[in-house]
Amino acid sequence: MTTEMQSHFDVLLAEDRRYRPRPEFTSEANVSDPTIYEKAAADPEAFWAEQARELEWFTPWETVLEWDRPWAKWFRGGRMNASYNCLDRHLGTRGAKRAIVWEGEFGEERTLTYRELHCEVCRFANVLKHLGLRVGDRVAIYMGMVPELPIAMLACARIGCPHSVVFGGFSPESLSDRINDAEARVLITQDGGFRRGSVVPLKQNADAALERSASIEHVVVLRRAGDRAPVKMCEGRDRWWHELIEGVEDECDAEPLDSEHMLYILYTSGTTGKPKGIVHTTAGYLLGTALTTKWVFDLKEDDVYWCTADIGWVTGHSYIVYGPLANGATCVMYEGAPDYPDKDRFWDLVARHQVTVLYTAPTSIRMFMKWGAEYPQRHDLSSLRLLGSVGEPINPEAWVWYNQHIGGGRCPIVDTWWQTETGMILITPLPGLTETVPGSATVPFPGISASIVDENGEEIEPGTAAGYLCINHPWPAMFRTIFRDPDRFVENYWARFPGRYFTGDGAKQLENGYFAIIGRVDDVLNVAGHRIGTWEVESALIDSGDVAEAAVVGMQHEIKGQGIAAFVTLKGDIEGTDSEQEKLRRHVAEKIGPIARPDQIIFAADLPKTRSAKIMRRLLRDIADGRVLGDTTTLADPAVVEQLKSQYEAQGKTE
Ligand code: PRX
């Protein structure tokens, strides 16, 4: 940790930087009894069991937790269904309540009540059954932000088919890799999605992906873009959504599934190799997401809740679909970009739909800051009562801006730390209880135990040094394995610090025990809140055919938090021109998806290596961030790094 960072942490707890919950908020809050932490810590299993009784079970469980480290089984013997819990059990009391309030990029609106959503989900579940899907078969979903995406997910959950949602911004190759790993039998997609006024050709991408994916038997295509995205339907394989659901029964019994039945697979980047399939199961996941939604967002019956994430990432799975719907909430869902048609689109949405709880990412907040307060000022944001942040560390400056310009100084901010693997929020304030401090996600949720450890796995005292963030005990929404790769599951997460789950994050505990997250300590980048493995970008660069060697590191980025810097040695006599830079950027975007497009590409005759030929990424990171170079004594050729540094200063051009 740099000394600069150390002093950054020292000031976090200054008296004038603390925000106490307002008494009016606390008196109405879902959780206002501070002893909840002690009670949960004294007997976490009893705590989770008590909360699990709030869900609807077809068969009660026999044991709360079976922990054969690192293999966890929660609520063994129990049977339930996530789709049933999100829909059917609300019908008696909330049938006419709005479940999804959707807005398209061009301003069209669609509202689905719980009864209507239930009906659509049942019909589509019947369609999936007619296509021959059986319990356990995997379904890939590659869509934009349209209501049919959660409908498809809940239909899968209803009949016990694990879904694998692939973010609509991913390339055909990324899609086919995920389909192949999951061996999905059905792909659900749409003709085209809308983003910033242009069409994302989802079906065309899917066609390209399916050239390399043999497991898919049927493709269901939703019509959304119409004439703006002409598609070719492959006879015998592709069917239109609207034709398939015509005349189909709108009742479909929810399958009583084992608590540990696989609910979904979601792929995420790791340090090496292709993205790994994170496996979440039914009961524990639903409990974790439902309870955190209720307590962290202080969700009330008349709230209008909006999480701005894309459902293609875990935030959307847990906090647009399963958590909020399990609570019977009214959720806003928006299809498009925040600056379409103008930079006030989010605030226009908040005001028109009277949003009360808003959950977004630091990258967006920094972008809004850069655009200026005039955009939120155009609208009445007084409906807002709570704000959330997720996905990356939020810098105190952005936190304070969010508080003032969006929250009007009156809304508590919950900075929530969690991961695809954790399934649910694990470190977070409880808004009626926790004094918040900009830059810190504060404390573990009740029932969760976290520690910072050093290289040897010894716990580090709060207020001293930074170290590795670990979770000490199992939690209900934890991922159960990596799909078809249990060895990697053990190796990546449980082997480094025996007895603990290693998150891959560096963090520090402040003097008062609060956690401040520094960021990833492995070769995973967090670009605009999205995880990208350096290895994936390096492979894409090599794959261009022009690159002999590549090393990718994160660099500080004003908006995205982290950007991508690629140090590249070209083959033979290929020249490091501007057009070569552009060609490589484009290749990476096509190969992985636009989010992986490098911000900087630096051509270098050589990369700095140790005598055992290992690339010294630490030095590349120093160069990319313009820092004083760290120790260079172990380099095979110390001159390389000086040369690189001057090349970087001469060539480095951020997009
Ligand atoms: O580095 C942490 C960062 O995002 C990583 C998890 O990424 P992903 O699995 O894509 O899930 C993102 C949405 C939950 C973590 O290892 N991260 C997430 N939330 C925070 C955060 N870093 C700091 N503060 C947060 N609130």
Image (cartoon, rainbow, N blue to C red):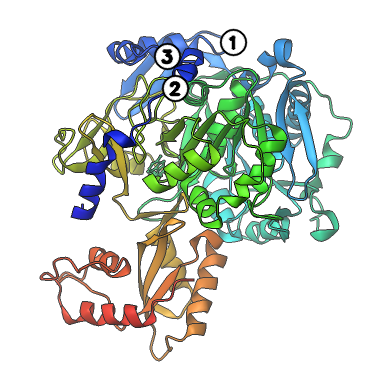
Q: CA distance from mark 2 to mark 3?
A: 12 Å
Choose top left, top right, bottom left or bottom right for residue 466: top left
Q: Residue furthest bottom?
A: 573
Q: Is residue 228 above or below residue 365?
A: below
Q: Which residue is disc 3 drawn over?
A: 32
Viewer-proximal residue, 477 or 520?
520
Report which residue position mark 1 lands on: 58
Q: Position of residue 379 (x, y in %)?
A: 66, 42
User: Which quadrant does ligand 1 occupy?
Assistant: top left
Of tags 3 and 1, which is closer to the observer? 3
Q: Amino acid at mark 3?
A: Ser
Camera-nearest residue between 430 and 213: 430
Is residue 186 found left or right of 64 in the rendered image? right
Q: In screen coordinates, is 327 left or right of 120?
A: left
Give the x, y percent position of residue 29: 49, 16
The amino acid at mark 1 is Phe
Sequence order check, earlier mark of 2 and 1:
2
Q: Residue at x 27, y 28 (%)?
A: 472
Residue, far right: 247
Disc 3 to disc 1, how far (Cα)?
32 Å
Is label 2 within 8 A of ligand 1 (CB to nearest ligand atom)?
Answer: no
Q: Determine whether 404 is above or below 22 in the image.
A: below
User: Which structural element holds mark 2?
Assistant: loop
